[in-house]
Image (cartoon, rainbow, N blue to C red):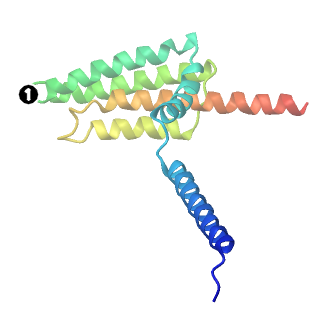
Amino acid sequence: MSYDPQKQKNLHNERQTDQAEKEKEASDSEKEKSPQKPRRSLGNLAKKILPPISQMKFSDSAIFVALGAAGFKDLLDLISLTGIGYFLVIIMTFLIFIFIGFMILLTIMSGGGGGFWILLILFGGAGIELLPGIDFLPVTMATVIMIYLRILSKRRKNQEKMQAQESYA
């Protein structure tokens, strides 16, 4: 068998080319697998959070009054832990939730989105507040915040629907 240096050189070059292609594919797959930069994930989070905040209106001041009443109610819950004003706190719970309901109604009437879920959240929060043992948690404030975020998201959806209808016209 004769030795051909040209064939040997071609074989060597092909092996190097194959090796370079494998290394390139490996580096490309590592780039794809690398986690996204934190800025991108924070940017996506900001895009999700900021649109509801951009739907805030001056007429939403009733919600902030309701939030203050919720804070007062959560402070009253600490008094009920001592046992002194337990029945007073139960009565105040009903009165404050009625007040919060009216404040939410004012916000909805001034351009917010209403719905069954908002009432369900409000009654659910009131029910949790009446459970003994966990009534000291700030559930009332969390309830008002959840309702307000729900109203803001409904506003955003309504605005998107209006823009979609205007684009068709």
Residue found at the far bottom of this picture: 1
* In the foreground, 48 or 69: 48
Is 128 rendered above or below residue 138?
below
39 sits to left or right of 92: right
At horizontal 54% and vertical 24% (from top left) the residue drawn is: 50
Q: Is residue 131 above or below residue 104?
A: below
Local secondary structure at mark 1 = loop
Q: Residue at left 80%, top 33%?
A: 164
Question: Percent from the top left, x then y, of residue 100?
Answer: 42, 23
Which quadrant of the rendered structure holds the C terminus? top right
The amino acid beneath tag 1 is: Thr
Q: Position of residue 47 (x, y in %)?
A: 56, 29
Residue matched to label 1: 82
Q: Looking at the image, which is closer to me, 139 or 18?
A: 18
Which residue sits furthest top?
58
The extreme front residue here reads: 2
Q: Quadrant of residue 145?
A: top left
Residue under the point 58% across and 36% down: 115
Q: Residues within 10 Å of mark 1 (few under 14, many from 20)?
A: few
Measured as percent of width and height from the top left, residue 88 is found at 20, 24
Nearest the eye: 128 or 84: 128
Quadrant where the image shows the N terminus: bottom right
Where is residue 11? Give x, y as percent.
Answer: 63, 71
